[in-house]
Amino acid sequence: MKLTDYLMYAMLKSLQLFMVLLPFKCVGMLGRVFGDIMYVFVKPRRQITYDNLDFVYGDKLSKAEKKRIARESFRNAGRNFTEILWLPRVNKNNFRKYVEIDRNALEKAFSNGKGVIFMTMHMSNWEYEPLSCTLNGFKLASIYVPMSNKAADKLLYKLRATHGDVLIPKDRSIKKIRELLAQNYGIGMLMDQDAGGKGMMIPFLGKPASTAKGIYTFARKTGAYILGTIMVRDKNGKLIVHTEDVGVLPETESVEEFLHKMNDMASAYIYKYPEQWFWMHRRFKTKSVHPKGH
């Protein structure tokens, strides 16, 4: 590894050791400050945020309201970062103090016996969703994209796997996902990412967006149960996982019909909690898809 990698690791590890000494509320407050700093200095992401807000809302929102959403979105991102560093403080005895999920919804989904696909998104602190499953006694795996900085990636990998979440590198995910679903694992899959030229152009927040077919494809081939899980932070700072029961795909449901429902679900939560969505990623980057993708 490069010297810069080691320096990054040392910085993150030191910050992580400091964060775990603080109460959860203080960690969140520091995260919001970090988000304000990012808003000022990370100009490319700030520009993407405003481009997305303008594209989605046009003149329906004032400049002041767009700025409020943008600032809060950055604060949420900063809070996510500091709260990830705090993950070692969460355990089976205290996790319900910070995260809430309907256990009955989990039991119903896993009773299918063919695995569960958790249809999730970049909402609130999505990094805390896996522990809401594993600390409730269910097996879970998530797909991740390794960071270019190997030392930082090693630390974040350990933090994400703290509570038993099995992490699958994206470039080796297809075979592994099928194997784990057959073992009745839950698999976390994002529904709000740009899918590039291989996706299908489906409305997302009322605008054409390249949408990945992976959730539909795996569910169709394996018979896995689909459960929408969207994290929302309440006014007291607690992370609430809202569950949307999709179930096993009907034999007659087409991929296009399913993707419309999926995007409508995601859009509804973003419209309701716009400041908690990750507006700084390029959701609308792809303007057209390969004909075979549609």
Image (spheres, rainbow, N blue to C red):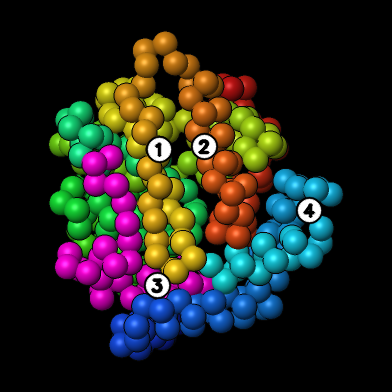
The disc placed on residue 244 is 1
Above-or-below relation of 134 to 92: above
Which-is-in-front pick, marks 3 and 4? 4
Image disc number at residue 83: 3
Front-most of residues 294 and 95: 95
Residue found at x 44% / y 16%? 253
Spot occupied by residue 201 in the image (x, y as percentages of width and height) = 62, 30
* In this rendering, position of residue 154 left or right of residue 281: left
Tag 2: residue type? Met
Q: Which residues are magenta?
A: 77-105
Tell me the kind of residue under disc 4. Leu
User: Label 2 vs label 1: CA separation?
Assistant: 9 Å
Compute the Cα span from label 3 to label 4. 31 Å
Can residue 54 be seen here? yes
> Distance between the Cα atoms at labels 1 and 4?
28 Å
| Mark linked to residue 61 | 4
Q: Give the image quarter of residue 65.
A: bottom right
